[in-house]
Amino acid sequence: MSVRHFLTLLDLSPDELNTLIHRAIELKTDWRNGKIFEPLKNKTLAMVFEKSSTRTRVSFETGMNQFGGHALFLSPRDTQLGRGEPVEDTARVLSQMVDGVMIRTFEHKKIECFSDYCSVPVINALTDQYHPCQLLADIQTFVEQRGSIKGATVSWIGDGNNMCHSYINAAIQFDFQLNIACPEGFDPDPEILARAGNRARIIRDPMEAAIDSHLIVTDVWASMGQEEEQTQREMAFRDYQVTQQMMAQADNDALFMHCLPAHRGEEVSTEVLEGPQSVVWVEAGNRLHAQKALLEFLMA
C-alpha cells in the first residue's frame, strides 16, 4: 500500500477524519484512566522545525513517548537543511532512518516537495498556507463540548491566513457553514475559498458574521514572519477584535477558540479569552490526543 501523508485535511476522507476525531476522544479517555498503549514502540518520528513552537513540539513529543516511540527534534541549526542541502535529499535520507516525519516550516511547497521524495508518512505541523493538525484538535474540542459539528455555523474573525484556509477545508470535510470576516486586502486564497463552494463565504462586517454562530474562532493579526507589518495590521483589524458584544451576537451556547498564543486586547479581549465560552485551554490540550490518533493512523 502506498504511504499516506497528512499535508492538508483534504488528504483524508470525511469518514477517515470523523473516525480520527472519535479515536482521539477514546485515546484521551484511556490516557486519563492511566491505560498504557504503545502501538509505536521502537518507532521514531523526526520533527523538523523551521518555525518556533510550544504546543506542536510538546504535543508530538509527548504523544510519541506515550505511544512507546521516540521523537527526534531537528532544527535548521542541527541539520544539513540549514546549510543548503536540497529538501528532496534530506527526505530520502530520513526515509531510510525514521518511521515518520513531522515538519513545521514556512513555504507549503517545501513540505509538498519533501513528501514527494519521502517513503514514510509526512505530517504538516504548520506551513504558511495550512495548519491541519490544529483543526483536528479544534473539531475534537467542539465534538466533546457540543456533539457533531455537521450543519453548524462557524465564524472565522480575522486574517485569511493558514488557519482560515484550514477552516475552509474543514467546512468541506466536516460539512458546516463557515462565515469569514476579514478586512479587504486580507482575504483567504481565492482558489482555496472557491473549493468550498457555498460552504464558505466572506462577510466583511464581523458582527454580522457572528450572528447565530455556534463557534467563533480567531488568530493573531500578525503571524510568524509578519512582525514588521504589526502596526499596519493593527489599523486594518481594529474592528475585528472578538469581544463580549460579538459573542452576544452568536448562539447562546456558542464556543470561542483560538490556536494560541493569544494577544489579549488585540484579536480577542481578555474578557472573552478568560470567559465561560472560551475553550482554548482544552483546545490546546487536545493537540496531544488528536495528533496521537493521527500518528496511530499513519504509523502504527
Image (spheres, helix red, strand yellow):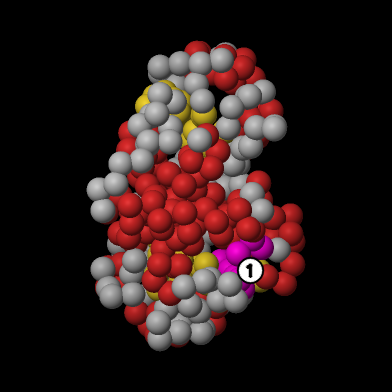
Q: Nearer the viewer, residue 238 or 164?
A: 164
Q: Mark 1 belongs to which amino acid?
A: Asp
Left or right: 85, with 56 as reference point? right
Give the residue at x 32% y 60%.
282
Regarding mark 1 in the picture, which secondary structure is present there?
Answer: loop
In the image, the segment drawn in magenta is 172-184
Left or right: 8, with 53 as reference point? right
Give the residue at x 51% y 84%.
212
Left or right: 142, with 15 as reference point? left
Determine whether 128 is above or below 68 in the image: below
Give the residue at x 51% y 29%.
101
Determine whether 196 is above or below 259 in the image: below
Q: Was residue 178 drawn as part of the magenta stretch in this picture?
A: yes
Q: Nearer the viewer, residue 161 or 204?
A: 161
Residue 107 picture location, percent across and down: 59, 36
Q: Nearer the viewer, residue 157 or 2?
A: 2
Q: Was residue 97 drawn as part of the magenta stretch in this picture?
A: no
Residue 130 picture location, percent across and down: 57, 47
Residue 271 picture location, percent across and down: 27, 73
Query: Residue under circle 1?
Result: 175
Q: Which quadrant, please, contains the N terminus?
A: top right
Give the residue at x 33% y 69%.
278
